[in-house]
Image: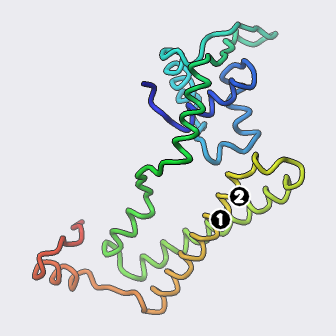
Amino acid sequence: MTQRSGLALAVLSLLTEEPMHPYRMQQLIRERGKDDVVNVGQRSQLYKTIDRLARDGLIVEHATERETARPERTLYTVTDAGRETAEEWTREMLAVPRPEFPEFVVGLAHLPQLTPADAAAAVESRLDTLRRRLAGARASHEAVAGLLPRVLLVELDYTIAMLEAETSWVAALVDDVRGGRLTWNREELLRLTSHSGLASPDRP
């Protein structure tokens, strides 16, 4: 069974359109803005994914092409098994939530490692980034809304909704820490957990 991944599904999906070589796949993922949801930053990871899909019979070599002053490129196409796998993966990704471990939540779980002032400064930095990303996502949506069918923009709709929710929540967290409504003292927490039998905050 081939390991499921966002990048593997992106490759299979692209190859259902037409045969193409890895560079074209990477180019289309970026041109269509899918690099916001699929990591194609490293070409080596794309090649490893293609090799794995080919090994498992989900894609096959279709042809080779050579352009002037360019090395020979291998074009791949999807197999029937690859099409079925793409459908199955898409259905599972939509239907079944998987446990995820985002680093932000890990950081929240270990707030006592920092003083309230340090934590507020760090979260304020995140808030600035979230606001920039939200503005960028909204601008991208406005630029293509009405030009493309909504089905091609649903992941951007979701991204905007998640950014709006996180931005609002993080802003409230900053206000609570800065306003003293959420505060802590590491030494007091250590004493509390040692006497109560609760798990203590991680030691540096």
Instruction: Please say if the residues under marks 2 and 1 sit with CB atoms less than 8 Å apart.
Output: yes
Which quadrant of the rendered structure holds the N terminus?
top left
- The image quarter in which residue 6 lies: top right
Say what amino acid the circle numbered 2 marks.
Answer: Asp
**Residue under circle 1?**
161
Report the amino acid beneath label 1: Ala
Q: Identify the residue under disc 2.
A: 157
Could you tell me residue 77's position as x and y percent?
Answer: 67, 16
Q: Nearer the viewer, residue 193 or 144?
A: 144
Q: Residue at x 49, y 14 (%)?
A: 55
As drawn, 1 above or below 114 = above
- Element under disc 1: helix
Q: Nearer the viewer, residue 12 or 198?
A: 12
Is residue 68 or residue 86 the one in the foreground? 86
Decide: is 68 above or below 102: above
At 66% from the left and 15% from the top, the residue drawn is 76
Residue 174 x/y as whole percent: 51, 81
